[in-house]
Amino acid sequence: MEVTLPVDLAVELDRELSQSAFKDRSELIEVALRRYLAERRESTERLAALDRLADLVDAAGLYEKTLVPER
């Protein structure tokens, strides 16, 4: 696979590579991509958990009971 980066990002990548323990660009990009995908997966799971929690709050009427001022 070949990836073309904008010049500014390629410069940043090379700078990071020179200051790290990564052996080459491919290794650095692989680690970065794996971390990005893991964080994205975790974010998706957290949002799904929040959605389930919101459904439980709605089903129990807790929002209206605790957060809506009496009218």
Image: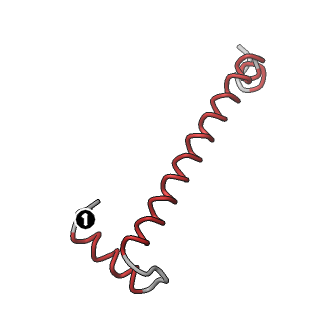
Where does residue 57 sit, x and y in percent of width and height?
Answer: 73, 24
Rendered position, 7 above or below 36 = below
Quadrant of the image for the N terminus?
bottom left
Q: Residue furthest front?
A: 1
- Read off the residue under disc 1: 5
Where does residue 48 sit, x and y in percent of width and height?
Answer: 61, 34
Q: Identify the residue shown where x is 55% and y is 46%.
A: 41
Q: Residue furthest top?
A: 71
Q: Residue furthest bottom?
A: 18
Q: Identify the residue shown where x is 43% and y is 81%.
A: 23
- Pick the front one: 71 or 53: 53
Quadrant of the image for the C terminus?
top right
Left or right of residue 10, residue 45 in this image: right
Q: Secondary structure at mark 1?
A: loop
Where does residue 49 sit, x and y in percent of width and height?
Answer: 66, 35
Q: Identify the residue shown where x is 29% and y is 69%.
A: 9
Rendered position, 63 above or below 7 = above
